[in-house]
Structure formats: structure tokens, C-alpha cells
Image (tube, grey):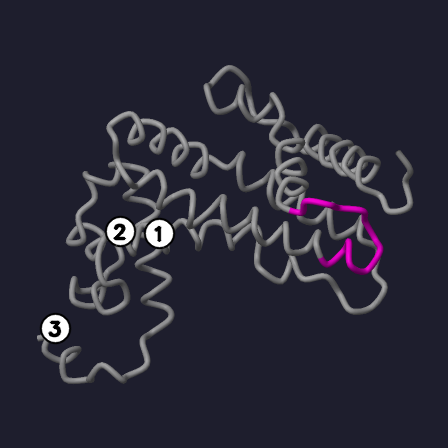
Amino acid sequence: MPDKLLQSTGPGRPKDPAKRRAILDAAKTLFLRHGYEGSSMDAIAAEAGVSKLTVYSHFTDKETLFSAAIKAKCQEQLPELLFQLPEEEAPLENQLIDIARGFLALINSRESLEMHRMMVSLANQGSKLSRTFYEAGPKRVLEEMALLLRKADQRGLLQVEDPLRAADHFFSLLKGGAHFRLLIGCAAPLSEEEAEAHVQDSVQLFLRAYRAGQTG
């Protein structure tokens, strides 16, 4: 009966954002718990408390849903607004610190660590999902950061010849050895004080390298 009611609404009917969020939350939970292959659309629908038809009405297939779940996770910690350079003269350093905090919280979260481990396993199996993961998450964040740095260069706030490479430098500083040790289970997560110190140090190093007006 619920499926028939949904079918009668027509394709132009606005979709329920609450159901979309529930589907994405269910997808993130099950993909991490059971892996991509072990998570069916039926199981995701049941976890979200909706019909399978509703899942397909929001996401055309499982790969599309997987990509959307990755994007949603990244946007939780790093919303697009965070990468927009304010029109008014706001300190760039403060914005970089906010991005650094969000990025560090994202990559060190349990969900992100489990997803990275799963992607490495899938890559060894020749799966194309690793590329889907990269394009939906890390690549999007890298490109948005590069766009911010390009605008900062144009405004004279930084001196950046290659924004994409500079964005890579920024996030590589934040990952450092601590993230690798956490990823392979050789260390505990940083404390709040350690994480904040790492953010401050990384941003200051980045600014020293790319601050405008430097010579040679």
C-alpha cells in the first residue's frame, strides 16, 4: 500500500528531505558495517524506515547512493560555505583555522577511518568504488580549497602559483604522521588540546610558505 501511494504522487512531486537524510544516514551506517557489497538497497530501506521504492526515487542506484553518502559526510564537517572567501576584509587565518579544524575532525572520525580502510581493501580487489569515493569526497574538498586559495591569491592575501598543489600541501600538513598512525591502529586519537595545537601549527606553517609579499 505505501508503494502504491508513492507511485501516485508523480515524478514532479517534491521529495521529502527528512526521508533523504534518513536514507543517507542508513547508507553510511550499513556501508561501514557490512561493506558495499554486503549492503543491499532493501537493507538500507529497512534501516531508514522507508520503502525500497522511496530509496530509488531519491537515488537511482546503489553507486549513486554511495557517492551521495560520501558527499554528505564531507559536508557535515566541511560545508561549502566554509570555502567561500568573504567579501569583507576578514582575517584569512581565521578561515584557514576553521577549515583545518573541520578537516581534522572529519578524517579522524571513526566513520572516515573505517571508510578509508574499506576503500583500500576494495582497491586491492580492483573495484571502481575507490575512485567513486575519491571523487565524491577528497577530490571535492581539494578542489574547493584550491578555488579559495586562487581567490586569496587574486586578492593579494596569499602568493599562490599553483592553487591545487597548495591545497594539497595544506591538507597534507594536517594529516601528518598522526593520521597515518591512527589509520593503521598504532595510536589513539589526538586529544582536543593536541588536535588544536596541530591545527594552529599547520596553519602557521602554511601561511609562512604562501603569505603574500615574500621574496625568493
Rendered position, 84 above or below 200: below
Q: Is mark 1 on a helix, strand or loop?
A: helix
Q: Mark 2 points at which residue?
A: 63
| Position of residue 156 measured from the top left corner of the image (x, y, whole percent) | 84, 56
Q: Residues within 10 Å of mark 3 (few under 14, many from 20)?
A: few
Q: Which residue is drawn at 75% across and 46% down?
A: 160
For disc 3, the marked residue is: 3
Magenta part, dominant SS: loop
Q: What residue type is labelled 3?
A: Asp
Screen quadrant of the N terminus: bottom left
Q: Position of residue 206 (x, y in %)?
A: 76, 37
Q: Does the magenta stretch include residue 96?
A: no
Residue interval drawn in magenta: 151-163
Q: Is residue 51 left or right of residue 197?
A: left
Which residue lies at the image location 21% right of the left edge and 44% below the top edge? 39
Does the residue at mark 2 contact the one at mark 1 (Cβ under 8 Å)? yes
**Quick one: label 3 or label 1, which is nearer the N terminus?**
3
Q: Position of residue 148 (x, y in %)?
A: 68, 55
Label 2 – label 1 distance at C-alpha: 6 Å
Structural distance between the alpha carbons of marks 3 and 1? 25 Å
Residue holding disc 1:
67
Task: Tell me the residue at 35%/47% (across/down).
Answer: 28
